[in-house]
Amino acid sequence: MRLDIVTIFPEYFAALDISLIGKARRTGLLDVHVHDLRDWTHDRHRTVDDTPYGGGPGMVMKPDPWGEALDAIAPPAAPPAQDQPPSGTEPSGPSASDDRPEPPSEPVPPSPDGPAPPTSGPPEMSTSSDLQSPGLSARSVARTPGASASSAAVPRLVIPTPSGRPFTQALAAEYAAEPWLLFACGRYEGIDSRVAEEARTRMPVDEVSLGDFVLAGGEVAVLVMVEAVGRLLPGVLGNADSIADDSFAPGAMESLLEGPVYTKPPVWRERPVPDVLLSGHHGAIARWRRDEALRRTARHRPELLARLAPETLDERDRDVLRAAGFPVDGERMAD
Ligand code: ADE
């Protein structure tokens, strides 16, 4: 999977050299390219922000450097040749997420020095020295195994913002199936809205929130998303089975929090590990884990229980939930 990250703080992404994600990069499962947005500015101060129209506090990120950055990383498709009239059946408006334009046949090579002229990109910033060569061929992405050419020709642009749609495990799984993601880290009051609007005419764009709180910028949000997505890529986790037991994992855990976990010693500071976990009885252990997941979800995230389909609950589930104070006989629980 190819990841491009545009930011005014490339240093944040040194963390992507560490642990699971660092290893995934070194083994070639993840191809991460970090770009400094200021390389697409043209003034002495390398300005990326300006005052908001309509007044108000704070600053807004200017559209020009963002437009140039996105053009350089994901070059717009060349206009149709003169002797080939455009097809009347092609949509002229924004493309849908599975209707992505074809890339130009040759990518624009990054410029090695100085501010980028309008048609070329900046030098690539990498957070490690073992990345592949910087020039990205959109066609090489299109050849990524498992990716159809049309779905890989442009990246999916992800813009972290507190006003976006929620980032969930399901969205992380969707992203993990993409061959190419492009993250745009906003700062200040955000990025001029026309950037996302214009990008949407040629690539899928998601504005995504990590939760109901406000960060100082998108960098930490992107680190979170890259880790959540990266660990789902085949070959990244040592034991792929563990993904299925995660909180929110598609399937039985989709709307449940994972329960408590234990390791050796069997007694620590007079606290024993629950007997069932030492019993070797796999059925009983699975049942205990589900009970604990139901109890913990009822305690910490009762609103999630409303998403459980009643037909997926057995008698024991219902007893556990009733004991935790949740009705189980309605259409949806916790209604
Ligand atoms: N940027 C600032 N706050 C954010 C949030 N909650 N989620 C994603 N990006 C953000």
Image: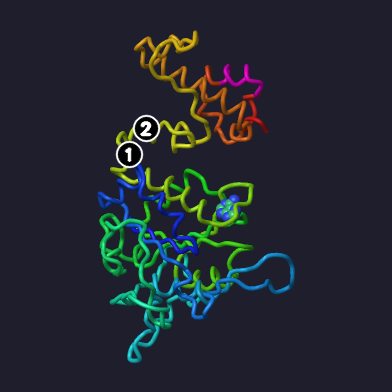
Q: Is residue 321 magenta?
A: yes
- Reading the image, the residue beneath label 2 is 242
The residue lying furthest to the right in this view is 55
Q: Which mark is residue 202?
A: none
Q: How is the image coloured?
A: rainbow
Q: Secondary structure at mark 1?
A: loop
- Residue drawn 50% across and 69% down? 200
Q: Label 2 near label 1: C-beta < 8 Å?
A: yes
Count of numbered circles on the image: 2
> Distance of mark 1 from mark 2, alpha carbons?
8 Å
Stretch of the chain drawn in magenta: 318-326
Q: Which mark is residue 237?
A: 1
Q: Position of residue 59 (x, y in %)?
A: 65, 67
Disc 1 versus disc 2: nearer the observer: 1
- Front-most of residues 250 and 115: 115
Q: Quadrant of the N terminus?
A: bottom left
